Image (cartoon, grey):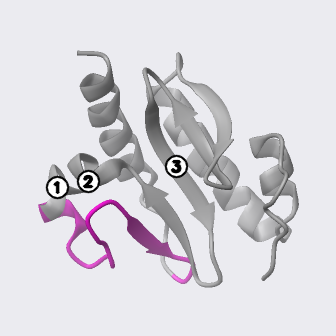
Amino acid sequence: MTSNKAGLASIDEYIKQFPIEIQERLQKVRAAIRSVAPDASEAISYQMPTFKLNGNLVHFAAFKKHIGFFPTASGVAAFEDELQGYVHSKGAIQFPFDEPIPYSLIKKITKYRVKENTK
């Protein structure tokens, strides 16, 4: 799977460049984030779909074998126990394509980030 992320103007453009089954997952990630962050704005930042609310809230992106979710270091640290079984680092989580995407966990983490960014 390849993409030409440079110069993208919107999340819609980003999603449309992937195969339909990946587009569907990306749209569901987007909807999960939007459901708990309705006041966040959408942007492309670091060549990835980004939600902003008083600064960067979360980013997500499609890769060859997974969807990357980037809720900052605090968003990962706060859910360390729930992230067991997923490859993750200080500020990133990988949700593999060969497993169901945990949309409810994405919502919980995003909700946490909304609280952080609106203190």
**Circle 3 sits on which residue?**
59
What residue is shown at x 83% (from left), y 41% (from top)? 9
- The location of residue 45, given as percent across then percent down, is 62, 46
**Disc on the earlier residue, 2 or 3:** 3
In this rendering, the answer to whether 4 lies above or below 50 is below
Quadrant (top left, top right, bottom left, bottom right) of the N terminus = bottom right
In this rendering, the answer to whether 101 lies above or below 57 is below
Q: CA distance from mark 2 to mark 1?
A: 6 Å
**Disc on the earlier residue, 3 or 1:** 3
Contact, CB < 8 Å: mark 2 with mark 1? yes
User: Is 119 or 27 nearer to us in this picture?
Assistant: 119
Contact, CB < 8 Å: mark 3 with mark 1? no
**Circle 1 sits on which residue?**
77
Q: Is residue 83 magenta?
A: yes
**Circle 2 sits on which residue?**
73
In the displayed structure image, the side of residue 56 where residue 113 appears, left or right = left
- The location of residue 86, given as percent across then percent down, is 32, 76
Q: Is residue 14 magenta?
A: no
What residue is shown at x 34% (from left), y 27% (from top)? 114
Quadrant (top left, top right, bottom left, bottom right) of the C terminus = top left
- The location of residue 118, given as percent across then percent down, is 31, 16
In the displayed structure image, the side of residue 27 where residue 73 appears, left or right = left
Tell me where the magenta segment starts and ends, as one range: 81-98
- Amino acid at the residue labelled 1: Ala
Q: CA distance from mark 2 to mark 3?
A: 12 Å
- Amino acid at the residue labelled 2: Ala
Crowd rating for badge 3 (residues with CA inside 10 Å; few <14, some 14–19, many 20+): many
In this rendering, the answer to whether 16 lies above or below 109 is below
Crowd rating for badge 1 (residues with CA inside 10 Å; few <14, some 14–19, many 20+): some
Secondary element at image label 3: strand
| 2 vs 1, front mark | 2
